[in-house]
Amino acid sequence: MVIPPILFFIVFSYMPMYGVLLAFKNYRVIDGIWHSPWVGLKYFEQFFQSPSNWRMIKNTILISVYSILAGFPVPIILAIALNEVRSTLYKKTVQMVTYAPYFISTVILVGMVFQFLDPHAGIVNRMIGLFGIEAQNFMGRPEMFKTIYILIGIWAGSGYAAIIYLAALAGVSKDLQEAAIIDGASLLRRIWHVDLPHIRPTIVILLILSIGNIMSVGFEMIYLMQNALNISTSEVISTYVYKIGLVNSNFSFSTAVGLFNSVINLVLLIMANYLARKTGNSSLW
């Protein structure tokens, strides 16, 4: 049973590390990776010397931090709310409605959002029009991109992410709940002093993993939402690597950018885990 996952990580995680050499070489297809000339840190210097690249790094960090601050608490709140629901039919209905967007293709999801936000026929503009507000081109306003992206992410992923917290809440001792009720604790008190302490290790571990992925903003959704008007706030490292590496065939430079991205994520993961271990009893290692 252990062999398949081990083979998976060897083939798809460790063997591709060989390609990291491209970041330090002037890769030419006819020479291959080994015989292409070494250039050292040339592409890293080229990346850091470009003023526009700092804007891209800033966009990546802001979108990720915004996602954690706005989106991370939502699955926790949803799971706690569902855990307190006593009507089985209502609970299953809410779960189905909140889980469903997770299983919708990203392309379809973004297409739906474009329809909702259409300046002429979109339901959002029709609704704000009832209050006398002029129609807005939301997808063409750079300052709106991050908010729209975060809201889509919350809509699409919160229901599915809540499953983990629901599973953790299922292990809360009924004796503690009953003891809290006998002592006169209100619902909010029971949630704060019984439920949340029980799922705190799960929250900490998932938060550490989220911090470790700050520089890895999802590529598909952002790329589909990009246009010439919002590119100043929507260009992130993942879309930049795609355009430079695959579209422009600059494999060495894109590998250097990707390696920089991965190293930053690793450092953030180690720091977050260290802080979690020092401030509490929960950590990845």
Image (cartoon, grey):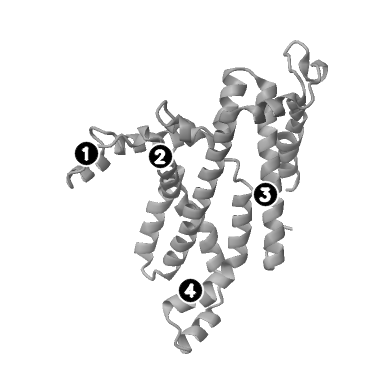
Mark 1 to mark 2 CA distance (whole Å): 18 Å
Please tell me which residue is depicted at 59% across the width and 17% down the height of the picture.
248
Task: State which quarter of the image contains the C terminus.
Answer: bottom right
Mark 3 to mark 1 CA distance (whole Å): 43 Å
Q: Position of residue 131 (x, y in %)?
A: 18, 47
Task: Judge left or right: residue 149 versus residue 43.
Answer: left
Please tell me which residue is depicted at 57% across the width and 67% down the height of the picture.
199
Task: Judge left or right: residue 126 versus residue 228.
Answer: left
Q: Which mark is residue 143?
A: 2
> What residue does disc 4 label?
191
Nearest the viewer among 177 and 220 is 220
Assess whether mark 1 and mark 3 are in contact (beta carbons under 8 angstroms).
no
Mark 4 to mark 2 CA distance (whole Å): 37 Å
Q: Earlier in the sequence, mark 1 or mark 4?
A: 1
For disc 4, the neighbor class at 10 Å (few under 14, some 14 to 19, many from 20) is some
Q: Earlier in the sequence, mark 4 or mark 3?
A: 4
> What residue does disc 1 label?
134
Q: Position of residue 63 (x, y in %)?
A: 51, 43
Residue at disc 1, secondary structure: loop
Q: Amino acid at mark 3?
A: Leu
Q: Earlier in the sequence, mark 3 or mark 2?
A: 2
Q: Earlier in the sequence, mark 1 or mark 2?
A: 1
Task: Judge left or right: residue 233 versus residue 23.
Answer: left
Please tell me which residue is depicted at 40% across the width and 28% down the height of the picture.
229
